Amino acid sequence: MENEIISENIIGKKRVLIISYDFVGQNMAGPGIRFYELSKILSAVCDVTLAVPNKIDIGTPGFRSFTYDLNNYKSIQKAMESADTIFIQGHLLYYFPYIRNFKGKIVVDLYNPFNLESLEMYRNENEAERVRIDKNNLNILNTQLSIGDFFICASEKQRDYWIGMLASLGRINPYNYDNDSSLRKLIDVVPFGIPANAPEHNREMIRTVFPKIKAEDKIILWGGGIWNWLDPITAIKSVWELSRHRNDIKLVFLGIKHPDPKLPEMQKCIEAINFCKELELLDEYVFFNEWAPYDLRQNFLLEADVGISIHQKRIETEFSYRTRVMDYIWARLPIITTEGDSIAKLVKEENIGEVVKYENAQNLARVLDSTLSNKSLREIYKRNLNKIAPKYLWQNVAAPLADYCAKSEPAPDKKNLFKIIEMQNKKMINLVKNNIEGITNALFITDNKNRDAQYIGENELGKVFFIETNPESEKNKIDDNYQGTISRIKNLILKRTSFDTVIVNNAFQSLTSKNFYDIVNIINMRLKNDGILFFSIPEKKGLSQLVNISGKSFDNRETIDNFTIEYILKNVGFDIIEKGNYEKSDEESDLSKAYSEIGEIYGKNELFELFEIKMKQDNFRSLKLLSKFDILSSEELNSDRSVKGKLKKYFYSLTSLYFENVRKSFNEVMKSINNNIHLQINNEINELNRKNRERLILIYFNIFKQLMFEIKNLGYDMNELKQIISNLKTGTEEKAGIEDKIDLISKDFDNIDKLIGLQFTSRYFLARKL
C-alpha cells in the first residue's frame, strides 16, 4: 500500500529512489513488474523508495512508495534531494528533464530498447510524426547514456548494442576502461526474473472467465499484451489450421487492455480480433482476456499446457527480451517461440520447448500439435525448466544491480570531469576551514539550501543551520529593497545561539550599501569573537546575463562595489583576511590538484604540471686547477743558475705542464657531462610537455563534449517551451507549465556557464570578527 516518504534513512544503507514510468499495482505490465520486483530485492541492501504514476493497490514489503504527478515536474524533486541513487527507465526524462541535473548517482535501465519498438509501433503514422517521435526517442536515449553512472540491460546481445551507443557518446573512455577493462562496472546484464516462491493454483481462472473452454481442452497461452512488433496473426492462423482436425485446441490471450491509459491502442491487437472474427474463431477457439491481475496470473499459467511467444522478423526482435517467457519458466510451462532473439537461443540450448520459423503458420501448427499430443515430451521440457529456473530468480539476476546500489560509486569519467567544478564550489568551505579551527556550529545563508548542502562534508562545519533567502514556501514576491527578507533573517538568527562561522553564499541577487550594512550588523550579533564570515555576491556573466531568461531582476550596476564592502566590514568590526572571486585559483589550490588527477592517464608517478629546471652553463664555475701555481717564478728557482737548479726548474716545468693538461682535460669532461645533462633534461621536458598536451586535449575534449550535451539539452527544452506556448494558444496547456519549463531552461544556461568557466562567478570576502 501507499506509504509516506520518511526523511530518515535506514541506518547504514544507501538511499535509492526507483522512479517507475509504468503503472505498479494489481494490474501491471512488464516494466511495472520489473520495478516492483527490483524494489523488493534492493530493499534487502538499500533504503528503497518507489515512485509510481498511479495509486498503488498492492503490498510494498520492505520499501516505501508514493505517487507522483506526470504533469508536475516538481512532484519527485523532494524525494530526489534525499536520495543517494536514482533508478530510471524509458521516457521518464521527457516528463522530468531536470533529472539530468541530479547530483547523486544515476542507474539507467536499458532493458527496453524503446527506440526500436517505436519504429514498428508508429509505423502507420505520417512520416513527419514518425521522424519526430524517432528524434525524441534518440534524444532521450542519448541523455540517459550521457548522465548514467551505471547501466543495466536484459541480455549480452543488448549489452553489445548499448556499448556501441555508449562508445559513440564518448563514455567508453580511458577513465571507465581503467576502472574495469571488461566495462562490467559501467554496464552489466540484469534480465527479467522470476519470484522465489513457486506458483500455487488457488482459483480456477481460464474456464471461469471463458466457460466455453472445456476441462479436456488443451490451452495455448499467449502470456502478455499484443504489441505491434509481435505476430498474433501467425498464432491465430496456426489455431485455424489445427481447428480443421482438432476441436480441443484453445488459444488464450492473457491481456489486451494495458493498465496504463497513456499507451495508445495497438493496431496489431485490433487486427488480431478482427482476423478471428473473419475466421469465425473468436470465443470458439481464440479468446481475449482484458488483463490478468499480478497476484492471479499464476492460475492462468498453471492451467495452460504450453506458452507461446510469436514475433515478426524485425530489428526489434534481435534485441528484445520477452518478459512473458520468464513467467512460463516460473510456471514450468513448455515454451514455443519464434526464432531470432535471445529467448529462442535459450529455448534451443536448454531444451525447454520448441523454436519455430518466422511467420510460418503451418510450422507453428505442426509444433503445437505434436507438443500438445505428447505428454512425455512436455514432461522432459518441464524437468529441464526445473534445472534452469533457479538461475532466473530475482535475487540472482539482480545481483549486479544490488552490488552497485549498495556501494553506489559515480562513473569515473563523470566523477573526474565534475570534480573540477565541485572543487571550485567547495572553495568557500575550504577558505573557512583554513582560517578557523574547532568549528562546532555554523550558519549558512543561501538562496538554495539543497545546492550548497552537498558541498559540506559530514561534521565538516559542525552543526549547520541553514536559512534560505527565498524558499519555495514563500509565495509572495519579496520587494526590491529586501526589507522583508532581512527582517525574516534577523528573526531567525536571533533565535539561535552564537556561531563559530557564518557563510553567506550567493544569497542575494544584488545588494545596495544599506542592504549590506544591515545584513552584516545582524550577523555580527551572533558571530563569536574571532569568528569567520564568508560573504559572496553573484555576478551574472555569459549566457545568464545575456539572456536572463529566468526573469529575475539583476543589474550589476546596482550592486555594492568592493571599496564600500571593505569599508562597511571594517566599520562594523571585521578584519578582512582575503578577498577575490571564483574565477581565480592559486597554483597550489585543490582545484589545480583536481586538474592533475583528471589528467593522470599515463601513470600515477608522472608529473603533470609544467616546470622549469634552472641548470645553465654559466651556473658552473670553471675549474682552473693550478692556474695560480707560481712555483716556476719563485725566487728559489730563478736565483739558482747551477746545472742542478736548471734541471730542477725543468722538471718543475714538466710537472706544471702535466697538471695544466689535467686541469684542461677535467674541465672538458665536466663540460661534456653538463651538456649531456642538459640534453637529457630537455628530452624529458619535451616528453612531459607532449604528454601534458595529450592530457589537456583529453580534458578539454570531455569538457566540450559535456558542453555540447548541455547546449543540446537547451535546444530540446527551448523546443518544448515553443510547443507549450503553441498549445497555450489553443487552450490545451496550463500556464504553470511555462513557468516550470522556463526554470529548467534557466538551469541549462547555468550549466553551460559553469562548464565554460568551470566555476561559479562570484565575488567573495573572508573576514574575521575582532
Image (cartoon, grey):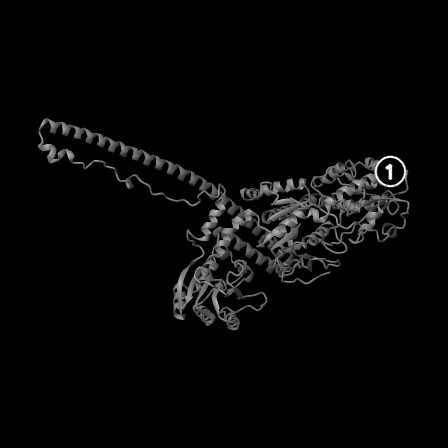
x and y percentages locating residue 123 in the rendered image: 71, 44
In the image: residue 68, left or right of residue 494: right
x and y percentages locating residue 456 in the rendered image: 52, 59
In the image: residue 91, left or right of residue 770: right
**Res. 698 in view:** yes
Which of the 4 image quadrants contains residue 389? top right
Q: Is residue 441 above or below residue 262?
A: below
Q: Is residue 180 above or below residue 460?
A: above
Badge 1 crowding class, 10 Å Cα cut-off, few under 14, some 14 to 19, many 20 or more, is few
Q: Secondary structure at mark 1?
A: loop
x and y percentages locating residue 361 in the rendered image: 82, 37
Residue at the (80%, 36%) spot, across then down: 360
Residue at the spot of label 1: 374
* Three-letter code, disc 1: Asn
Which of the 4 image quadrants contains residue 154? top right
x and y percentages locating residue 126 in the rendered image: 69, 45
**Res. 309 in view:** no
In the image: residue 632, left or right of residue 470: left
Q: Is residue 597 above or below residue 729?
A: above
In the image: residue 613, left or right of residue 747: left
